[in-house]
């Protein structure tokens, strides 16, 4: 009989020697068959999660620093634009920092003077429009009464405007609008200050910046970087030079027109049209022509029409005659490429991208042209747009050949028959 314990459950017999407990059999079987988790899988999961976290962190940081990066890009191109003037002053013995300060001071004085003149002109015109508003309203009411056979009065129109919900809502929201405009103005001034500061450092420490970049590159790469930098300076400076020259010509042409029509503030309006139409791509012409048209309308409505016609005609003359000749020696970029680059820059960076798109594309084109190998073009008529077999018959000639029956050919028997009859 098996021994039993009266105080507890019966003691199980020990398993025979060499047997495996039932509860551990599946685990040992899996290990023996090699189906367990690979050792590299946890490290791969951690690596993937780390890369994903780094990507998310980099994306978040890029979005947060987009404004700063755009400001740095604008500052870099401004530094490239003033680089020739600063280098010329530094070559004559002036310290580079002082030369950069002189150039920036001159630009700031010109910009401040232009803004002050433009502001005084706009303030004077706004006051004049407000003072003459009753006369304008009377003329409009008289025209409506004469053409539409109505009986409107200025008093009725004024009372309707005062009692309208639109005016009440505008007055209620005007304080919020003033605060928003003030915040935008302060933000714009801070952005301009940031761009000016970085531009000054880039221009003043240009040699040190180039030396720092070249110090981490091999000698062959250093030559390529310096060549690209030189091309960027030439193209950016050439672009601004050509734009400045076209702005001068445009401003003088519009000044002559406005002075001939007797429009007030003709010199300031000429400068406005020249600068805005040349340095704001795509829509600059329309923005530039709107202000002279508005001021000319206060003198005579027909003067605004003449200004509009002149702006459109001069724009066509500039696009097809003046701009290709002036930019051929400076930027040397095809008009279609320039137009497409402006749209691409606008899609990427907005107004900033539209402004720097042309010099950036011109720099890239010149840099690639210096390293892309070119071959002599074969003397083939097809290069000039001619077909190999000549121009060929025209459309009407081919139609006549198709519908005209072929000439009848005589057989040898018909040729010999007259000889037999003669005999």
Image: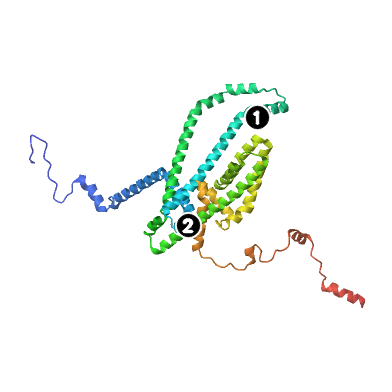
Tell me: 150 left or right of 45.
right
Q: Which residue is mark 2?
A: 88
Residue 321 showing in the rendered view:
yes
* Residue toward you, 61 or 14: 61
Residue 75 coordinates in the image, percent (x, y): 45, 49
What residue is at 65 percent from the left and 45 percent from the top?
256
Nearer the N terminus, badge 1 or badge 2? 2
Expressed as whole percent of the image width and height from the top left, the position of residue 194 reads 43, 44
Q: Position of residue 399 (x, y in %)?
A: 75, 59
- Residue located at (62% from left, 50% from top): 318
How far is mark 1 from mark 2, CA to CA?
56 Å
Judged from this view, the residue extending furthest toward the bottom is 423
The residue where tag 1 is placed is: 136
Residue 380 as seen in the image, left or right of residue 370: right
Q: Is residue 422 above or below residue 23?
A: below
Q: Report the coloring of the rendering.
A: rainbow
- Left or right of 297? Residue 78 is left
Tag 1: Cα neighbours inside 10 Å, few (<14), some, or many (≥20)?
Answer: some
């Amino acid at each position: 009989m098996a021994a039993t314990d009266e105080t507890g459950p019966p003691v199980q017999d020990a398993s025979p020697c060499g047997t495996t407990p039932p509860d551990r059999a599946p685990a040992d079987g899996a290990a023996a068959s090699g189906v367990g988790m690979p050792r590299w899988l946890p490290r791969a999961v951690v690596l993937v999660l780390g890369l994903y976290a780094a990507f998310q962190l980099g994306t978040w940081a890029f979005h947060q620093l987009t404004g700063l990066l755009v400001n740095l890009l604008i500052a870099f191109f401004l530094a490239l634009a003033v680089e020739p003037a600063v280098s010329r002053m530094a070559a004559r013995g002036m310290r580079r920092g002082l030369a950069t300060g002189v150039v920036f001071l001159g630009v700031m004085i010109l910009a401040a003077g232009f803004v002050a003149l433009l502001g005084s002109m706009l303030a004077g015109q706004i006051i004049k429009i407000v003072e003459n508003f009753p006369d304008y309203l009377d003329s409009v009411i008289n025209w409506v009464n004469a053409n539409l056979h109505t009986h409107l009065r200025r008093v009725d129109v004024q009372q309707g405007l005062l009692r309208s919900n639109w005016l009440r809502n505008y007055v209620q929201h005007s304080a919020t609008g003033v605060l928003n405009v003030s915040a935008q103005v302060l933000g714009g001034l801070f952005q301009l200050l940031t761009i000016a500061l970085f531009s000054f450092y880039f221009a003043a420490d240009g040699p040190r910046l180039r030396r720092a970049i070249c110090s981490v590159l091999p000698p062959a790469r250093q030559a390529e970087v310096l060549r690209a930098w030189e091309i960027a300076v030439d193209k950016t400076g050439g672009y601004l030079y050509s734009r400045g020259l076209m702005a001068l010509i445009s401003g003088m042409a519009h000044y002559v027109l406005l002075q001939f029509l007797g429009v007030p503030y003709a010199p300031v309006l000429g400068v406005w049209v020249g600068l805005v139409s040349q340095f704001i791509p795509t829509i600059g012409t329309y923005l530039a022509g709107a202000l002279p048209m508005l001021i000319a309308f206060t003198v005579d409505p027909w003067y605004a029409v003449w200004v509009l016609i002149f702006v459109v005609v001069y724009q066509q003359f500039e696009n097809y005659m003046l701009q290709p000749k002036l930019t051929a020696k400076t930027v040397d970029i095809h008009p279609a490429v320039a137009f497409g680059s402006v749209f691409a820059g606008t899609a990427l960076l907005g107004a900033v991208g539209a402004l720097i798109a042309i010099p950036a594309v011109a720099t890239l084109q010149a840099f690639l042209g210096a390293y892309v190998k070119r071959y002599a073009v074969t003397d083939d008529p097809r290069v000039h747009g001619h077909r190999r077999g000549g121009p060929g018959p025209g459309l009407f000639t081919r139609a006549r050949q198709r519908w005209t029956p072929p000439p009848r050919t005589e057989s040898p028997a018909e040729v010999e028959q007259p000889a037999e009859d003669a005999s």
